Image: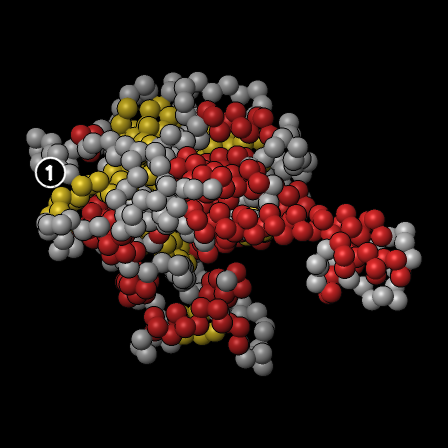
């Protein structure tokens, strides 16, 4: 993927990233809307590429490139205003919207600013989950880049991996950082780590406390606020002596070449201490949204001084302190952030309303006991009986990525409205912690292991009870919650359990069986190790006589009779 990105840019073309885990309908829309001329893929995704091409758009497998083609540098002169990328985010119309980037803008927002403000240098080893966003920060500064796939690898082994690879900078979303630290015991050391860079969500005071407890004195934490349209526009550095007043850390001070102002509904600037919409002024802000001229005009305003700057209306609410430090106070519209992903809830609502079984729908973000956000959908059914939660989830799964599917569905008689006829999201009822109505009947856990697994699931998913045959993802679980479950199970049973085990055993009963299998295997290895340690000093004849009587271990675990037994002779 990295080689493909560089090849596209060096050829003077623009790239659009497709996620193979997203529904085909969403990827097809992005291809059509962006007017992409070619699909780049690899062998593992070749079937998906062929499906998306529909015999109308060529595709190229980068694993099977013609090696006889010249590898000389193209050496093209590419104008700074040349389109470099289109990044699609959730859109309010029911379809994602594409934010356009050119080379000039990309180099400033995502490279120059990051390299300078974070002092990235060739000695740095950067770990991050976003390849597209972070690879240029590393490679153009001569640093090393270490991609993270949290969904696949989980968080249990992350601390050991970071220490082994001598990671110096770790980019993370605060909600993932919390889950990472949750698995730490305090014995882990990060001697090379110098920076924890947080983005995508507010940093809580409790996050700062975790940083102070588990990371070295030489490590800093930085809270960063930005958007796809502007890049980072303010940041706040935190060390072990920094005190945070209130529940949320400040968003920080404006970065170079940008200006932050707060504007009221009439577009007039408000003073320090007042709350209003955050707007970013900069000559590096570039319009706009691909093939959405009206949206571009509504979000990008001309420089009031008549200069070459543009003002971007972020939709975020904030308050400036007298010294220029910005406090982030959330969104003013229907947009929310879940695990760092920007989501327009109206996109989900539009898809729900397109279903024949639904009369009215509203979606809102609710805070869990852990302090994180979860999506809740409120449904007024058009049919009797009402659609099951499983049916709703399957309908959304066919059109939305996993992070946009609500964790909970609540059936209501009506959607509350304001006096102006808009959805009154504050009046939507609390979804509570009751187990959702599933197509699977509730069966209580029976064995001690099932009871413990059910307890862990209920805690992670903020539910009052979980049944033996309940599916984790039907209960509203997602990949980040899955990492928490696996971490809890590993701590409870001292097992080396891969994250994929939950995806392959998504019910309480199935996961309990996986745990028992691991325990049995572990006990068997301990018993064999005990037996082998007792026969090491014996003659070959005596060892052969005792070992079969002591354990029914497979013969493949035992060395040939002509050799001495040793601890290394079993798997």
Image location (x, y in percent) of residue 241? 57, 20
As drawn, is 137 to the left or to the right of 229? right
Establish if 368 lies above or below 22. Answer: above
Residue at screen point 33% across, 20% down: 272
Taking the image as drawn, is residue 538 in sight? Answer: yes
Q: Residues within 10 Å of mark 1 (few under 14, many from 20)?
A: some
Residue at screen point 18% across, 30% down: 427
As drawn, is 417 to the left or to the right of 327? left
Image location (x, y in percent) of residue 113? 49, 42
Residue at screen point 57% across, 38% down: 491
**According to the image, label 1 marks what residue?**
414
As drawn, is 529 to the left or to the right of 81? right
Quadrant in the picture for the C terminus:
bottom right
Q: How many marks?
A: 1
Query: Please, which residue is most extreme toward the bottom here?
Result: 68
Establish if 538 lies above or below 433. Answer: below
Establish if 188 lies above or below 353. Answer: above
Taking the image as drawn, is residue 301 in sight? Answer: no
Dot 1 falls on a residue whose secondary structure is loop
As drawn, is 379 to the left or to the right of 498? left
Residue at screen point 46% across, 24% down: 205
Q: Quadrant of residue 397?
A: bottom left
Q: Of 28 and 213, which appears nearest the observer?
A: 213
Q: How is the image coloured?
A: secondary structure
Establish if 209 lies above or below 513. Answer: above
Q: Of 570 and 554, which appears nearest the observer?
A: 554
Image location (x, y in percent) of residue 198? 48, 37
Image location (x, y in percent) of residue 128? 53, 47
């Amino acid at each position: 993927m990295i080689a493909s990105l560089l090849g596209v840019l060096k050829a003077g073309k623009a790239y659009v990233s497709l996620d193979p885990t997203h529904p085909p309908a969403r990827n097809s829309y992005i291809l059509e809307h962006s007017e992409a001329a070619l699909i780049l893929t690899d062998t593992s995704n070749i079937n998906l590429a062929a499906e998306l091409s529909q015999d109308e758009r060529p595709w190229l497998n980068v694993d099977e490139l013609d090696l006889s083609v010249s590898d000389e540098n193209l050496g093209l002169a590419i104008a700074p205003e040349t389109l470099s990328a289109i990044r699609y985010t959730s859109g309010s119309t029911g379809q994602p919207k594409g934010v356009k980037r050119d080379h000039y803008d990309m180099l400033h927002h995502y490279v120059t600013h990051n390299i300078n403000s974070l002092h990235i240098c060739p000695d740095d080893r950067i770990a991050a989950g976003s390849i597209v966003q972070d690879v240029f920060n590393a490679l153009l500064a001569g640093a090393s880049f270490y991609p993270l796939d949290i969904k696949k690898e989980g968080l249990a082994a992350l601390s050991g991996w970071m220490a082994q690879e001598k990671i110096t900078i770790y980019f993370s979303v605060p909600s993932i950082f919390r889950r990472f630290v949750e698995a730490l015991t305090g014995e882990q050391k990060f001697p090379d780590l110098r920076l924890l860079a947080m983005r995508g969500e507010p940093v809580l005071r409790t996050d700062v406390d975790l940083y102070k407890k588990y990371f070295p004195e030489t490590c800093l934490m930085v809270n960063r606020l930005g958007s796809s349209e502007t890049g980072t526009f303010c940041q706040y550095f935190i060390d072990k002596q920094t005190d945070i007043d209130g529940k949320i850390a400040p968003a920080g001070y404006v970065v170079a070449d940008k200006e932050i102002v707060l504007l009221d509904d009439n577009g007039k600037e408000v003073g320090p201490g007042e709350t209003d919409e955050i707007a970013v002024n900069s000559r590096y802000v570039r319009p706009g949204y691909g093939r959405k001229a009206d949206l571009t005009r509504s979000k990008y305003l001309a420089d009031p001084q008549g200069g070459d700057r543009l003002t971007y209306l972020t939709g975020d609410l904030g308050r400036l302190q007298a010294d220029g430090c910005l406090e982030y106070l959330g969104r003013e519209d229907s947009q929310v952030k879940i695990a760092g992903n920007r989501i327009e809830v109206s996109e989900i609502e539009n898809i729900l309303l397109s279903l024949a079984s639904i009369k009215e729908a509203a979606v809102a973000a609710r805070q869990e006991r852990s302090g994180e956000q979860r999506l809740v959908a409120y449904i007024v059914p058009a049919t009797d009986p009402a659609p099951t939660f499983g049916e709703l989830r399957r309908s959304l799964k066919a059109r939305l990525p996993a992070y946009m599917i609500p964790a909970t569905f609540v059936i209501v008689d009506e959607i509350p409205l304001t006096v102006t006829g808009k959805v009154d999201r504050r009046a939507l009822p609390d979804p509570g912690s009751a187990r959702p109505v599933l197509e699977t009947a509730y069966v209580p856990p029976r064995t001690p292991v099932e009871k413990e697994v059910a307890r862990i699931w209920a805690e992670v998913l903020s539910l009052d009870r979980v049944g033996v045959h309940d599916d984790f993802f039907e209960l509203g679980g997602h990949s980040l919650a899955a990492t928490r479950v696996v971490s809890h199970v590993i701590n409870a049973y001292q097992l080396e359990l891969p994250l994929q085990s939950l995806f392959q055993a998504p019910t309480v009963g199935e996961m309990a069986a996986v745990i028992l299998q691991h325990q049995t295997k572990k006990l068997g290895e301990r018993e064999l190790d005990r037996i082998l340690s007792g026969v090491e000093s014996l003659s070959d004849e005596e060892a052969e006589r005792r070992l079969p009587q002591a354990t029914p271990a497979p013969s493949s675990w035992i060395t040939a009779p002509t050799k001495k037994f040793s601890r290394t002779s079993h798997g």
